[in-house]
Amino acid sequence: MKKYQIIYADPPWDVMRGCDWGSGGVSKPLPYPTMTIEQIKALPIKNIAEKDAHLYLWTINKYVRDAYDIAEAWGFKASCLITWCKKRHGIGLGGAFTQTTEFLLFCRRGTLKTQKRIDTTWFLAERNLHSRKPMMFMDMIVEVSGDLPRVELFSRRKALGWDCWGNEVDSDIVLPNGEGE
């Protein structure tokens, strides 16, 4: 079974999409299946991670605390929380505050050294389609962690040099418990 030194994951957090502005309606489900925290924790990521590896785990405000627990369940220790700042786009998701940030938790397992230092933990980048992250983060990950075996979990598109696993692309890998696309 192939193992990876870089794991990049954007789990389908169990949230609702929100209602249409001005509709007064209830929140709608997301256009893809979501997972509970326990389901995400139970993924066999330990089995595809090298002894020395980096994890980059996307999360949102509601699940920041849980992301630390997920990283630990996957065999990693959290190191740094990176913030993606997005320009406002209409009313957006959120209650008292419209959500204009997402977070990327950088975690370590073993002693894999970084290759570059980035002099900030927040980045302003344009929004894309719902839940699609800017490619600049994948480029930054390779700069920081190196041009090593890497996988994107919960992929929405293929990226050069990355293996991928997700229900929106033809996956390159099958997880150890047989989960794959």
Image (cartoon, grey):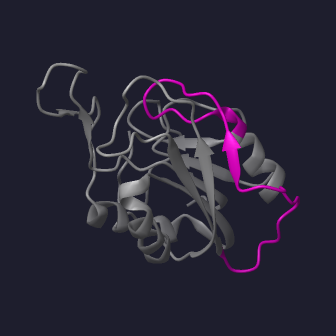
Magenta span contains residue 127 = yes
Question: Which is the main secondary structure of the residues drawn in magenta?
Answer: loop
Q: Evaluate whether residue 146 shows in this view.
A: no
Query: The C terminus appears in which quarter of the rendering?
Result: top left
* Residue for point 25% across, 58% down: 36
62 to 28, vertically: above or below: below
Q: Residue at x 11, y 27 (%)?
A: 25
Going by the image, does 177 lie left or right of 7? left
Q: Position of residue 104 (x, y in %)?
A: 58, 54
Q: Which residues are magenta?
A: 109-136
- The residue drawn where x is 24% and y is 33% is 18
Q: Say above or below: 125 vs 44.
A: above
Q: Nearer the viewer, residue 51 or 156?
A: 156
Residue 44: percent from the left, percent from the top? 42, 66
Q: Is residue 97 magenta?
A: no
Q: Within the image, what quadrant is residue 3 found in?
A: bottom right
Determine whether, in the image, residue 67 is placed left or right of residue 8: left
| The quarter of the displayed image where residue 37 is located | bottom left
